Image (cartoon, grey):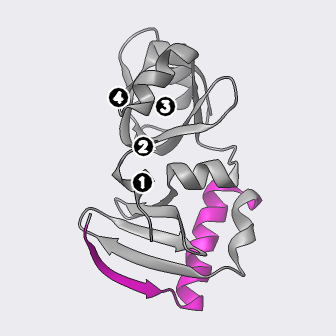
Amino acid sequence: MKVKSRVQLRKSVKNKMLKDLVSTFGEEISGMENKILERITLEEHSIILVDGKPLLFEIEGHLFPTVRGALEMGLQKRVVTVDKGAVRFVSNGADIMAPGIVAADPEIKEGDLVIIVEETHKKALAIGKALMGGQEMAEATSGKAIKSITHVGDKLWNMEF
């Protein structure tokens, strides 16, 4: 991936960004006020470095944690849990099928970005876009529930700055 630009965010931009994140994830994400945030513009999307680590990215005009960011921040909202059988497929970038989902945040709406975690240790495996609501995901017995966007081991995960 080619870096087009890298700039440190102004305080006003940073504060608005953090306010939006807190409204989505709650106070769990509020520890970033004193950290240095930089925006790196790539060909596909923008990444926000928090103290030099790629913890957030911008997709479809929304800011969302990367897989690394979800792991570091330990977020509890917009989370979908998959069973052990799905881990291998999700880690390789496969879309998430409804039968592999054991739990989903009931507040998830179709089109929301979500964090996919594994059942045993609750570690983030991927970030995806919900193709159905959270309640429906947990109850469905067939069909594709989440379109995978980024996962552990992909280009975004392996980037170093």
Q: Is residue 90 magenta?
A: no
Residue 142 vs residue 108: left or right? left
Residue 130 vs residue 2: left or right? right
Is any part of residue 105 visible from this angle?
yes
Q: Residues within 10 Å of mark 3 (few under 14, many from 20)?
A: some
The quarter in which the C terminus is drawn is bottom left
Question: For the residue marked with disc 3, what is the amino acid?
Answer: Gly
Q: How far is disc 3 from disc 2 in space, using C-alphas?
A: 27 Å
Mark toward the start of the polypeptide (1 vs 2): 2
Q: Nearer the viewer, mark 3 or mark 1?
A: 1
Q: Is residue 15 magenta?
A: yes
Name the residue located 37 percent from the left edge and 37 percent from the top edge: 148
- Mark number for residue 20? none
Q: Return the x and y of residue 19 as percentages of the image width and height.
A: 63, 72
Q: How many marks?
A: 4
Marks 1/2 in contact by CB < 8 Å: the verdict is yes
Marks 4/3 in contact by CB < 8 Å: the verdict is no
Mark toward the start of the polypeptide (1 vs 4): 4
Q: Quadrant of residue 104?
A: top right
Question: For the residue marked with disc 4, what is the amino acid?
Answer: Ala
Mark toward the start of the polypeptide (3 vs 1): 3
Q: Nearer the viewer, mark 1 or mark 4?
A: 1
- Mark number for residue 158? 1
Q: Secondary structure at mark 2?
A: loop
Q: Which residue is mark 4?
A: 94
Question: For the residue marked with disc 1, what is the amino acid?
Answer: Asn
Q: Magenta residues?
A: 2-27
Q: Which residue is mark 3?
A: 133
Q: Which residue is mark 2?
A: 153
Question: For the residue marked with disc 2, what is the amino acid?
Answer: Gly
Q: Secondary structure at mark 4?
A: loop
Q: Secondary structure at mark 1?
A: helix
